[in-house]
Amino acid sequence: MPSSRGGKVIHTKASRFLPHPAESDSARLSELVSHLSKNRTQLREEWLRRITGAELLQAMTKEELFAEATSVYDSYVEALSTGTLEALQAYARNLSERIIPRGVETNEVVGIVLLLRDVLARSLFAKYQEDFPILNKVLDAYEPAANRIAITVAVGFVQERERVIREQQEAIRELSTPVLQVRNRLLILPMIGLIDPARARQLTEQLLRGIRTTRAKVVVIDITGVAAMDANVANHLVLTVESARLLGATVIVTGLSPEIAQTLVNIGVDLGKMHTVGDLQGGIEEAERLLGYKVIPNRESDGE
Amino acid sequence: MEVPILKQGLHLIATVQSALSDADLLQLRDALVESVGRMRARGVIVDVTALDVMDSFATRILRDIAYMVRLRGAETVIVGIQPEVAFAMAQFGLRLEGITSSLDLEEGLAYLDEKTRRRPNP
């Protein structure tokens, strides 16, 4: 209700008072900043109370929360007074770096910034409630700045998060592509998880290099752990088999899921070139046969 | 640059030393196919370790060599294809259909020995 009444006032009176908008805006902004600095303790307390009430940032202790809230409040006011976002941006990034490992969610970070915005706006309402034209002008100065600050903090947090995710993806990518030698001249390449074109390329490179260094004659590629692959990656798999053959190694592919079998049939794979066996055990047995190994159970330890 | 052809036991070994022009490849083909008969070889090894590019023409000539040598009564093995070259060949659809390729010279010799042992001299 108050907002609709305030809205009317904008149109009737405020328009006359804006001959130099930039100049009056900056005057309002400095008035605003001095108001926020004067009531720092009280507003900060109010904000903290609201954060606790909304059950945000529960991963942090009360003391930590108080310290962070103070810094955020001061950076916030500083950003309003100087009109530059660099310091706040750097602080937001630094804060994100510290709290992301503790499981703080995006909605919490955005939530506390919006709460602060709300707390400050309410204090402005309270201060200027007698004078709507002035309130309007103060809000004209406050709202865009507060919005920019909220966006800056949120974007900073999300970017930091994305950076962490990218790093982890890289780590997973490196971890999950081992080329293992199980017998002389027999390699196993267990593929697990999501295979994207970049990972497929890396796998191929590793496998071909592995064949060279270990002088493998047979390679078993096990794709039991791959739920699905698109035509592009399936095609890449066929190319890998082909290039391994050019290096003089036979490739046995095991553990094809029905979906992957479907994909391979759809891209028209030449089954004459693709040696496939149902599961990894069968694949290793087949590889041993090709290499001339014969596994004989030890009678003594057999127990029968 | 001409490719030297060495005799090693029952086999001929042609080691490519540097990038080959189309004319060099044709010369290699003619020399190999001719030598197989003259030296009564049972196997031919073409070592391409030094090649870091394999185009469609080279692939076709290698295939021709293998087929012609087979018609002359011997087996051909291509050895030493680099991993990058192998993948590029697969990518561009340059297939060496029906031709054996091995990792290196040792492997190729082992393969040919196996092959000629199974098919004794008439």
Image (tube, coloured by chain):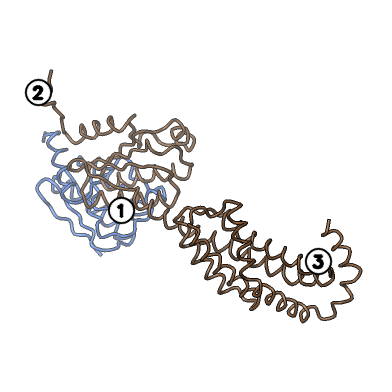
The chain to which mark 1 is attached is B
Expressed as whole percent of the image width and height from the top left, the position of residue A231 reads: 48, 42
Q: Which chain does blue denote in the image?
A: B
Q: CA distance from mark 2 to mark 1?
A: 44 Å
The chain to which mark 3 is attached is A
Expressed as whole percent of the image width and height from the top left, the position of residue B50 reads: 25, 60
Which residue is labeled 3 in the image?
A: A129
Amino acid type assigned to the residue bearing label 3 in the image: Gln
Which numbered disc covers residue A186? none
**Viewer-side residue, A82 vs A179:** A82
Q: Nearer the viewer, mark 2 or mark 1?
A: 2
Compared across the picture, whether A103 is left or right of A55 comes to left
Write down the quadrant of residue B28 in the picture.
bottom left
Q: CA distance from mark 2 to mark 3?
A: 95 Å
**Viewer-side residue, A233 vs A22:** A22
Image quadrant where one finds the N terminus of chain A? bottom right
- Name the residue located 47 percent from the left edge and 36 percent from the top edge: A263
Image quadrant where one finds the C terminus of chain A? top left
Q: Which chain does brown denote in the image?
A: A
Which residue is labeled 2 in the image?
A: A299
Which numbered disc covers residue B83? 1
Same-subunit check for callouts 2 and 3: yes
Expressed as whole percent of the image width and height from the top left, the position of residue A209 reads: 28, 53
Q: Earlier in the sequence, mark 2 or mark 3?
A: 3
Image: A97 above or below A189: below
- Name the residue located 87 percent from the left edge and 60 percent from the top edge: A5
Same-subunit check for callouts 2 and 1: no
Q: CA distance from mark 3 to mark 1?
A: 77 Å
Give the structural element (helix, strand or loop) at label 3. loop
